[in-house]
Amino acid sequence: MTQKRRRFGPVDILLILMMVLPMVAAMVLKMLFTPASDGIQISGALVYFTVHMPIMDWPISEAQVNSWMVIISILGLCLFLTRGLSVRSKSKRQLIAEWIVEKVEGMVKGNMGEYFKNFAPFVCAILALSAFSSLQSLLGLYAPTSDLNVTAGWAILVFALITYYKFKCGPLHYLKDMCEPTPVLFPINVISELATPISMAFRHYGNVLSGMVVSILVSSGLTGFSQRILGALPGFLATIPAFKVGIPAILSIYFDIFSGCLQAYIFAMLTMMYVSNGFALEDFLARKLNKKQKKEKKQHKSEPADTTVPSDA
């Protein structure tokens, strides 16, 4: 295997701009629509504008816009890494893309089995979307993962996949599983089933939002502490937030980077576990084989019998 160096061309520059400009646009919108305020203020996502609809109004919030900005940036990154793929001489960006694909496919096969190997793109999309959404807070933007509407939408999508694979063995098989280990527990199993998307949404949303709130509170507290301790110094020295230097950055490494990536990994792992554990593969294969045998038997019966009498030689 050989590596080759590919020069940056106009298309590469456009793809890099495709990754960067959405984040710049999100920061510009943030500055234009954020009202002036004194002191600390913790609020939800800004509402940029509202689309009037017949039934109810549709607010376009900061979380929605930032989510689309992340999607566009991820699309640009994927196009950049996969541009100019080659079998013989591989570039560094191709090696990075292949490494990502191999790691995600290995994770999916190890947690879900060979049957779900085609789930790798979906799981990779969840990881990238969740991680990059949480990392937006490093740019001073509102992280979409700190909005319950965003994480709830992801959880509902995952719940639809879980229910789909549970129904692949038939409705009766699904109802039978809901009555395990005894029919008395059917109401509790129904509650447990409905609690799956709720727990996934609130877990992701709560961890990201709490980290953001703690970082803001600590940063504001350190600013006040600097003013209280250094306020007696002459001139501009009294206005320097000395105690605010360094500590918020260390907290950001945990709450914004480590915790954001960890929550993305946890959400992806829960998705794989719920989907694979809810799908009875052996029962599905047995049901599929039974259907095939019945179909062959039906076709065999419908074929006309050969009544031709063989002629004597």
Image (spheres, grey):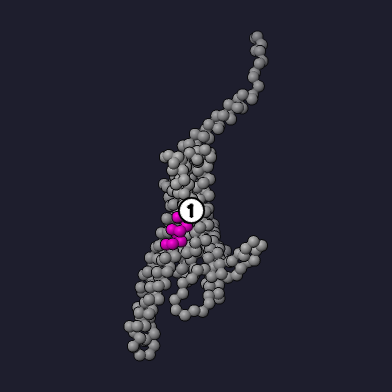
Q: Main secondary structure of the magenta part?
A: helix
- The tally of labels here is 1
Where residue 283 sits: x, y (%)?
48, 36
Above or below for 308 versus 49: above
Report if residue 256 is visible in the image.
no
Residue at x 65%, y 22% (from the top left corner): 304
**Residue nearer the viewer, 275 or 116:** 275
Residue at x 51%, y 58% (from the top left corner): 152
Residue 159 placement, left or right of 53:
left
Report if residue 303 is visible in the image.
yes
* Residue stretch rendered in magenta on the structure: 199-207
Where residue 300 sits: x, y (%)?
60, 25
In the image, farthest residue toward the front: 184
Above or below for 183 versus 306: below
**Residue nearer the viewer, 248 or 84:** 248
**Residue nearer the viewer, 180 or 10:** 180
